[in-house]
Amino acid sequence: MIDINLIPENLRKGGKAKADGVTINIPREIIFGVGGGLIVLLLAIHLILGAVWLMAMGRLSFYNAQWQKIQPDKAALDAIHKESGDLKNKIKTIADVTTNETVLWAPKFNAISDALPGGTWIKKMTLDKTGLTIEGGVVSKTRNEINNVGAFVAALKKSDDFMKGFVSLEINSIQGSRSNSVQVTDFSIVAKLPNTEAGKKRK
């Protein structure tokens, strides 16, 4: 008897044949090699990034050092620039005052010398855009230093040569001091030029 069965053998009931599973065997050497390569690659990337960071920090330190070297020179240049500006302002002030045709200084200095009472001397005279400041000292055996300062100012006010070009003459300060057991009175008087606010109000 001939038995014809069209069902595949692996689907037949009671059949001994089973579907074979597909199995891929990878050698351990390859697995270890790939894993080791990945670890080495990660270490290389880490080392490269670390080297880049070190180079950047080194360059930053270099620039900071260069900036610290430049700082003193920059400060000196700024100071020179400021002094230059101040000097220009002083020169301009002196030029504005001394080129004023209404003020003749030589007669004024002669008037100051002539008006000085005995025991009175001039320590310093300062000329700026506000006017002429005269600083001096007085010594008197009769202790009338303040009277001597008042007489000096009164004499200057009466002098046409001195007051020409000035709008006022005021006592700025009088202060007593002692030098080598001698009583000395220091004084300061100010002659205002007409371009000052005080001079404008008085005028």
Image: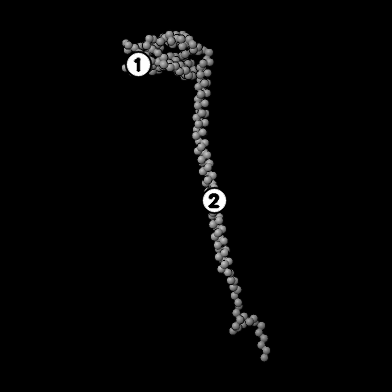
Name the element at disc 2: helix
Q: Which of marks 1 and 2 is in front?
A: 2
Name the element at disc 1: strand
Judge the density around disc 1: few (<14), some (14-19), many (≥20) Cα neighbours within 10 Å: many
Name the residue furthest bottom. 1
**Which mark, by number, is residue 51?**
2
Q: In which quarter of the image is the N terminus?
A: bottom right
| Residue 62, x across and y down, in percent | 53, 42
Considering only vertical position in the picture, is 133 above or below 85?
above
Which residue is nearer to you in this view: 114 or 196?
A: 114
| Residue 113, x across and y down, in percent | 43, 10
Does label 1 or label 2 sit earlier along the sequence? 2
Could you tell me the amino acid type at mark 1? Answer: Val
Judge the density around disc 2: few (<14), some (14-19), many (≥20) Cα neighbours within 10 Å: few
Could you tell me the amino acid type at mark 2? Answer: Ala
Considering only vertical position in the picture, is 178 above or below 64?
above
Q: Distance between the residues labelled 1 and 2?
A: 78 Å
- Determine contact: label 1, label 2, CB under 8 Å: no
> Residue visible at 53% across and 13% down?
101
**Which mark, by number, is residue 123?**
none
| Residue 186, x across and y down, in percent | 37, 17
> Residue visible at 64% across and 81% down?
8
| Residue 63, x across and y down, in percent | 53, 41
Note whether residue 18 is visible. yes
The colouring scheme, among rainbow, by chain, secondary structure or one colour, is: one colour
> Residue visible at 38% across and 15% down?
137
> Residue visible at 51% across and 19% down?
94
Which residue is nearer to you in this view: 66 or 8?
A: 66
Left or right position of 138 against 1: left
**Which mark, by number, is residue 184?**
1
Considering only vertical position in the picture, is 28 above or below 81?
below
